[in-house]
Amino acid sequence: MRVKGEGPTPCRYMVVGEGPGWEEDRSGRPFVGKTGKELNRFLDGVNLPHRSECFVTNLYREYRGKDYEYTEDDLRRDTPELESELERVKPELVITLGRHSSRWFLGEVEMEACHAVGWHDPRAASRTIFPIFHAAAA
Ligand code: URA
């Protein structure tokens, strides 16, 4: 099923992952599976905001299998939903998890070079993008 973002709206913080996994697909909620637990550890309310203070969402909205590589068609279909969440949520800080969502915001960046550094969002100067390695890879 399609998995939408969830969390307070508006909200200062937004987390953008790649796409739902099997457990997210079954529950219809983002980051509820194993990777979600890992994310909750990161979002400890100390170095980063607590999960309850974040709107949590994904770049892609549908689970297509474990090793599926998302395509340009997936991007065209799913990003209008992310754009409308950005408009509603109005985050000041967007934590992007991994290469896919980091690149959607920042262009052709390498994670090694941009991890854990705050960047101006080229689409919205008032927004900071904070890329970190994806919880699934960490
Ligand atoms: N679950 C999600 O919702 N997104 C990811 O990127 C990984 C797991």
Image (tube, helix red, strand yellow):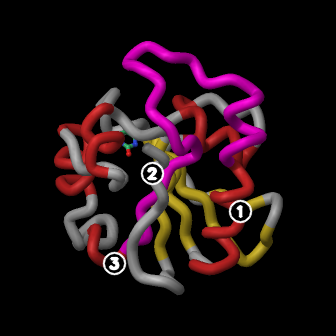
Few, some or many residues within 10 Å of mark 2 (<14, 14–19, 20+): many
Amino acid type assigned to the residue bearing label 3 in the image: Glu
Q: Which residue was labeled with disc 2? A: 3
Say the numbered circle drawn on residue 41.
none
State left or right for residue 2 relative to residue 103. Answer: left
* Mark 1 vs mark 3, CA separation in Å: 20 Å
Amino acid type assigned to the residue bearing label 2 in the image: Val
Disc 2 element: loop
In the picture, residue 111 is in which quadrant?
Answer: top right
- Residue nearest the observer in this picture, 67 or 130: 67
State left or right for residue 84 relative to residue 57. Answer: right
| Residue interval drawn in magenta | 54-78
Cβ of mark 3 under 8 A from ligand 1: no
Q: Comparing marks 2 and 1, which lies closer to the viewer?
A: 2
Cβ of mark 2 under 8 A from ligand 1: yes
Outermost residue to the front: 1
Which residue lies at the image location 61% right of the left edge and 59% below the top edge?
129
Few, some or many residues within 10 Å of mark 1 (<14, 14–19, 20+): few
Q: Which residue was labeled with disc 3? A: 53
Going from the N terminus, do you reach mark 2 or mark 1 first? 2
Quadrant in which the C terminus appears:
top left
From this view, report whether residue 26 is shown above or below residue 13: above
Q: Which residue was labeled with disc 1? A: 83
From this view, report whether residue 68 is shown above or below residue 78: above
Few, some or many residues within 10 Å of mark 3 (<14, 14–19, 20+): some
* Mark 2 vs mark 3, CA separation in Å: 19 Å
